[in-house]
Structure formats: structure tokens, C-alpha cells
Amino acid sequence: MKMNTDPFPSSQNLARIIARDLLSVGRLCVVLLLLILVSGIGVAYVTNQSRLVITTQNQLQLQREQLDVEWRNQLLEENALAETSRISHIAETKLQMSRPLATQEVIVH
């Protein structure tokens, strides 16, 4: 019989021994390790998605605020343009309009 004088087994034999040991004795450890890896990847994915949603929400809030300011300005402009005194002043000065006399009024039935 020939004795193995090599103090270190070949790496291929060592890999087989480790794989066989993990599959026979360390199944629970391998399963737990895989579950931990999947859980970590899931946490990273959910965190990334949450950040994207928060960024989108912030952008939409800024847009809403800008539209709200624009709406307020539109209301102020509408109120300013709709003032009766302003309309009367423009009609009299720029268009040379005046109220008709009672004799000039025509009533249509």
C-alpha cells in the first residue's frame, strides 16, 4: 500500500470535502446564509424604492406650491382687472366713452 506523504491534500479534494461537509452536516447554515443574503438584497431594494418615492413626492410638492402661488397671482390679477372703477376709467379715458343722456336711451322690448 502506498501512503499519502503529501501533508496538504490537493485543492480539488479539499473543495470536495468542504462541499460534501456543507451539504451533509451544514445544511441549516447554508440555508440560513442564503436567507440572510436574500433578506439583505430585499432591504437594499426596498430602501432604494422608498428613496425614489420620497424624491418624487418632494418634486410634486414643490410643483404644487408653485402652482398655488401662480393661482393666487391669477386671482389677484383677475380682481384687479374686474374692478368697476378701473373699467369705467379706461372706458372714459382711452375709449372716450360716456354715459348716454336719458333722451338718448332706447328701450327695446
Image (cartoon, rainbow, N blue to C red):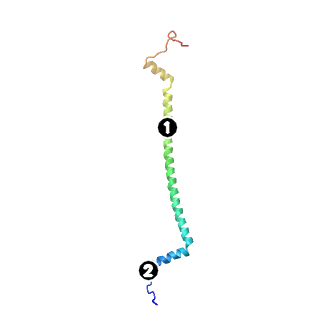
Q: Circle 2: is it few (<14), some (14-19), or many (20+) Cα within 10 Å?
A: few
Residue bearing the label numbered 1:
69
Residue type indicated by callout 1: Val
The answer to whether 30 is drawn above or below residue 63 in the figure is below
Residue at 44% x, 80% y is: 10
Q: Find the distance from the CA under tag 2 to the CA under tag 1.
A: 76 Å
Q: Circle 1: is it few (<14), some (14-19), or many (20+) Cα within 10 Å?
A: few
Mark 2 in CB contact with mark 1 (< 8 angstroms): no
Residue at 53% x, 74% y is: 23
The answer to whether 81 is drawn above or below residue 99 in the figure is below
Residue 28 disc label: none
Q: Secondary structure at mark 2?
A: loop
Identify which residue, 89 or 66, lies in the foreground.
Answer: 66
Q: x, y (%) of residue 81? A: 48, 27
Q: Secondary structure at mark 1?
A: helix
Residue bearing the label numbered 2:
10
The answer to whether 66 is drawn above or below residue 103 in the figure is below
Of tags 2 and 1, the one toward the viewer is 2
Q: x, y (%) of residue 84? A: 51, 23
Residue at 51% x, 61% y is: 41
Residue type indicated by callout 2: Ser
Identify which residue, 23 or 39, lies in the foreground.
Answer: 23
Q: x, y (%) of residue 101? A: 50, 11
Residue at 48% x, 40% y is: 66
